[in-house]
Amino acid sequence: MELTHFSFNVDDGIAVVLLDRAEEPVNTIGPAIFDDFNTVVERIETDESIKAVVFGSAKRNNFLAGADIRFFDTITEAEEGAAVIRQLHTLFTRIEALHAVHDKPVVMAIDGACLGGGLEFALTGSMRIATDNRKTQLGQPEVQLGILPAGGGTQRLPKLVGIATALDMILTGRPVRPHKARKIGLVDEVVPREVLYEVAKRRASESIGHLGEGGGSSFKSFLAPTHLQDLALEQNPVGRRMLFKKAEEAMLEKTKGLYPAPQRALEAVKIGIEQGNAAGYEAEATFFGELIISPESKALRGIFFASQMKKHATGISSNAEPKQVSKVGVLGGGLMGAGIATVSALKAGATVRIKEVDTNGVEHALRHVSRQIAKQVTRRRMTSFEGEQTMNKVTATTNWSGFENADLVIEAVFESLELKQDLLGQVEDLIEDDVVFASNTSSLPISQIAADARHPERVLGMHYFSPVEKMPLLEVIVTDDTDDRATVTAVEFGKRQGKTVIVVKDGPGFYTTRILVPYLNEAFFLLADGASVEAIDEAMVNWGFPVGPLLLTDEVGIDVGAHIVKIMRDAFGDRIAGPDMMAGLIEDDRKGRKNGRGFYLYNDKGERGSVDDSVYKALGLGPRRVLTETEIHGRIVSAMINEAARCLEEGVLQSSLDGDIGAVMGLGFPPFRGGPFWWVDQVGAANMVAKLDGLTEMYGERFAPAQILRDHAESGKPLR
């Protein structure tokens, strides 16, 4: 049997079929392998010598990563997408029938990523056995690409693990690890990788002759006491209605109704439960066809592809090799420094030495790292022993001992040019000439920090975002003096830390802070024009940002914001200056969440309450008036996008793709809108320029369109 994408071996009546997508780094499913897949299934159906089947993967750490989403971009009509899904349904139904109809048990041997279409394939089996490999995870992440699980996921998953658990997996897109999967009944057994196929073949052999029965343990797990309450609720029509209602409310609270995919996924689950499998599968196909051509899905897929591309980008045009980094020095053990130390040890596997000013700082930094590692152990992402080993890689000191051995030094202290220059000077007295020095600054030009450096070619910026352990972006900032080896060293180490890295040119605010300041400034202008704090923040959340600009100011710290705004105003003048409100807030001792006084009220635990109405008096503002959400988000978003365009025009950005990644992953620009440049392409550069011209006429030169936008409006060429 000639197969391009599978290996097929029969021994003692057990067929072991391994998926190996030809010339691809990971296994994906799509029309390109349908013929081979159908040939495999037909052989199993008709070959009487085959009594049971084990499906697995020939690729290490990868069972089946999901659909081949490159194929999605070829779909231009909804019916075209629906037709492909119907083909997939037919294939998966045949696999499911191997046991139920042909009395040939099917065991899925899962090692590595089992996601999206991969999990839907696994759900067709009689039994699922997963390895305890830390890279093994099972999930339905389709909503993160603006689609729904359409290979039967909305139908088979609820029947296996229960409606509530399935909805949580489907609507959030979060994967589960093997032991959690075993607990919820998604897999029947968890074994070491080394014995996966031995156990799978044994279970397949044991199942021969038990028509229509699965492994049994999933069903028993579902009947465990932890599931009985859910089971009672889900089998009751009134309970199901309540369950779906609560799920929808939670989903809308999170998505604000801006993402159509979760809504359609919920609907497909409901249809299948209430109307049966056939109706559920047809709903999947129809909804997939609608969603795959939607602007939201296209934007989300654009961000996904862009982030995948950055995994292979070096940020340089030469073939310079990075310095191998095994030892990292971190200056400052506060929230940022301790976070950098954590990802350096936990994800990059480096030995880390933190320097703090006193023993309290040392203890705080080490406690932070310890808590983050403990979370990984609790979630079974590492063993207790591995956690101890990782913690042993992190030490802290109040002196310079240990820094002489560093391969990379990352400074993460307060935004003071003098302090950063002083630390760089002291470090250069200790380290070797080829050691890279990186500043985690959010606004200060790297060239100024390196003004007196002995080796400015080794100095650059590594701008992390808070909290470091969660935020995916790293902005590497290079000066005219920074050499390629330093740049690629920072980029490659950032990837090891689990970051998506963009490289930008040096200048005040670089890229992310530079576009953030006009965004925040315009919120202050709107306050001055009479809009309320609530109206401004709600308008931006309703447009898709995770938090509004004024709440963000509280989170960052009003004093920190005032410092950054001054740096930017000194650099760019009136064009980037906001209304002079910060002074009033500082005089009133408002620093935001950290001292419990800002635009919002906070309790002793730092938990946010309602807007502090006395803030208007502190700002010298009078009564509020109603401004429409369209005016609010129109002004704020236009200010941000225009500055992003200037950054591209001036060469701060290497590409518009980097600009979209930076805004989405660093600043929370709505992913379903694709980023500033993707968004301009959707609305049209000519329309964007017309809007900015109108705003310029009403509010002044701060809205004057960047020349690059005018150029693209005239040419009609896209920015992305």
Image: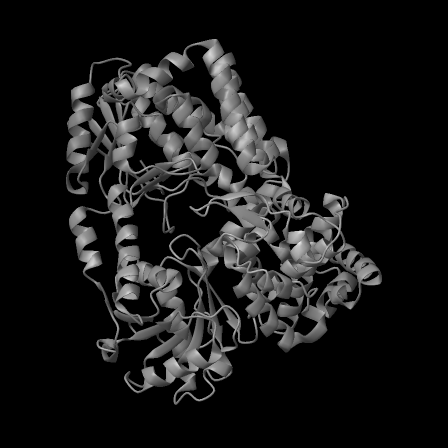
Q: Is residue 511 above or below residue 27?
A: below
| Left or right for 479, reference 651 | left
- Please state the horizontal and vertical placement of residue 653, each as a whole percent of the image: 57, 69
Depth order, front residue of 626/74:
626
Task: Tell me the quarter of the picture where residue 201 sits.
Answer: top left
- Judging depth in this view, the residue of 377 and 136 nearest the camera is 377
- Name the quadrant containing residue 698: bottom right
Residue positioned 15% across, 42% down in the render? 194
Which x, y percent locates residue 545?
58, 48
Q: Position of residue 426 (x, y in %)?
A: 33, 84
Q: Nearer the viewer, residue 93 or 331?
A: 331
Question: Which image quarter holds the C terminus?
Answer: bottom right
Q: Is residue 254 left or right of residue 615?
A: left
Which coloring applies here?
Answer: one colour
Work out whether 268 lies above or below 149: above
Q: Position of residue 211 (x, y in %)?
A: 26, 13
Above or below for 700 versus 547: below
All told, the count of numbered labels is 0
Camera sees residue 314: yes
Q: Residue at x 51, y 19 (%)?
A: 270
Instruction: Locate the N terminus and report the quarter of the image it occupies.
Output: top left
Q: Is residue 653 visible?
A: no
Relative vertical location of residue 474 with respect to residue 268 in this rendering, above or below: below
User: Is 291 displayed left or right of 524 in the figure?
Assistant: left
Relative to 171, 63 lies left or right: left
Residue 614 versus residue 452: which sits nearer the camera? 614
